[in-house]
Image (cartoon, grey):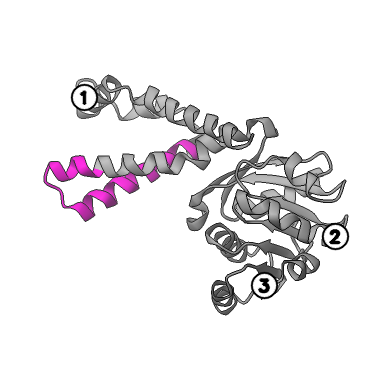
Amino acid sequence: MTLTNKKIGFIGAGKMGEALIRGIINAGAVDRSNIYASDVYEAGLERLRDELGINISTDNIETVSSSDILILAVKPQILASILPGIKKSITPGKIVISIAAGVPLADIGSGLNPGTRIIRVMPNIAATVAEAASAICLSENASNDDAECALEIFRAVGSAIVIPEHLMDAVTGLSGSGPAFIFPVIEAMADGAVYEGLDRHSALTLAAQTVLGAAKMVIETNTHPGELKDMVTSPAGTTIRGIYELEKHGIRAAFMDAVIAASNRSKELGK
C-alpha cells in the first residue's frame, strides 16, 4: 500500500478531520499509532485519543514534525493564520494536503516554503459516513506518487478523483454543496408519502434508501441515468405520471441552476 509506514498528521480535528481519521483507521490504511492530530480544543483531542488511540497535541509544530503527510483540516478563514507558524517545520520530504474550501494552491504555496509539495482536496460531508465524493488537484511540485497517497487517504472515506485546479469550483458546486441539494429531496419525497398516509419514520427510511439505491445503481452498473430511468418507467404507469410532474416543475433546470449558482459562489469566495 502507498501509505504503508507513513505518518499522517492533522491540523484540525473537527468533523471532517475526525471523519478522515476514522476512515483511515477503519480502512487499515495506516496504523493508529502513526496518526497525529493537533487542535485548539483539548477536550475533542482527548476524546479522539481515548476512542481511537491516536497521538494528540495542542502544538501544531509537534504534529508537523512528526508527520510525513500533513492534512490541513481547518476552515478557509483560519488557514492563512496557521501557515506562518508551521512553515519552517515543513521540510522538503513532506506532503501538504489542504481541504480548506476555495483556497487556491497558489495561496497555500505563498504561505509555505518554495517547492513545497501541495495537494488541494474538495471532500464533502458524506466523509462522516465513509461515502464522500472527493476531488484532488496537484501543485506543480507534487508528483504522481503524492497523488496516489492522497487518493488512498480520501478513498478510505468514499471515492476520489484527480482533476485540474480550474475545475475545483465546479466540484464545489456539485459534490461539495450537493448533499444539501439532496437532503430536501429526501424530505420532500417523504412528505409526499406522509400525505398519502405513511408514518414519518417509515417514509424517511424508504425515501433515503431509495436515493441511496438509485445512486448505487448508477455507480455499479455504469449505466446512463436516463437508461436506468427508462427501465422503471412503464407506459401509462405510475412512474411516468410522477416524472411528468417533475418535468412540469422544471426539476432538471432547478438542479442545474443550483450547481451553477454554487459553483459561481465558490469562484467569488476564492477571489
Give the main secondary structure, helix, strand or loop, of the magenta stretch: helix
Indicate which disc residue 32 carries.
none
On-image quarter of the C terminus? top right
Q: Is residue 138 visible?
A: no
220 or 65: nearer the viewer: 65
Point out residue 106 in the picture as x, y percentages from the top left corner: 76, 39
The nearer-to-camera label among 1 and 2 is 2
Q: Are marks 1 and 2 in contact (CB under 8 Å)?
A: no
Q: Is residue 132 visible?
A: yes
109 or 48: nearer the viewer: 109
The nearer-to-camera label among 1 and 3 is 3
The residue carrying mark 2 is: 88
The residue carrying mark 1 is: 241
At a point 78% along the width and 49% down the height, the residue shown is 111
At a point 81% along the width and 44% down the height, the residue shown is 142
* Amino acid type at image mark 2: Lys
**Is 188 left or right of 5, judged from the image as shown?**
left
* Amino acid type at image mark 3: Thr
Q: Earlier in the sequence, mark 2 or mark 3?
A: 3
At a point 15% along the width and 48% down the height, the residue shown is 198
The magenta-colored residue range is 190-219
Report, in whole angstroms, how far the alpha carbon at label 2 lies from the one at label 3.
18 Å
Q: Are marks 1 and 3 in contact (CB under 8 Å)?
A: no
The residue carrying mark 3 is: 58
**Badge 1, how many Cα within 10 Å: few under 14, some, many 20+?**
few
**Is 211 left or right of 246, judged from the image as shown?**
right
Report, in whole angstroms, how far the alpha carbon at label 1 lies from the one at label 3.
58 Å
Up the image or down, 87 lies above or below 252; here it is below
Examine the structure image and report whether residue 200 is included in the region drawn in magenta. Answer: yes
Direction left: furthest residue: 197
Report, in whole angstroms, how far the alpha carbon at label 1 lies from the one at label 2.
63 Å
Examine the structure image and report whether residue 25 is included in the region drawn in magenta. Answer: no
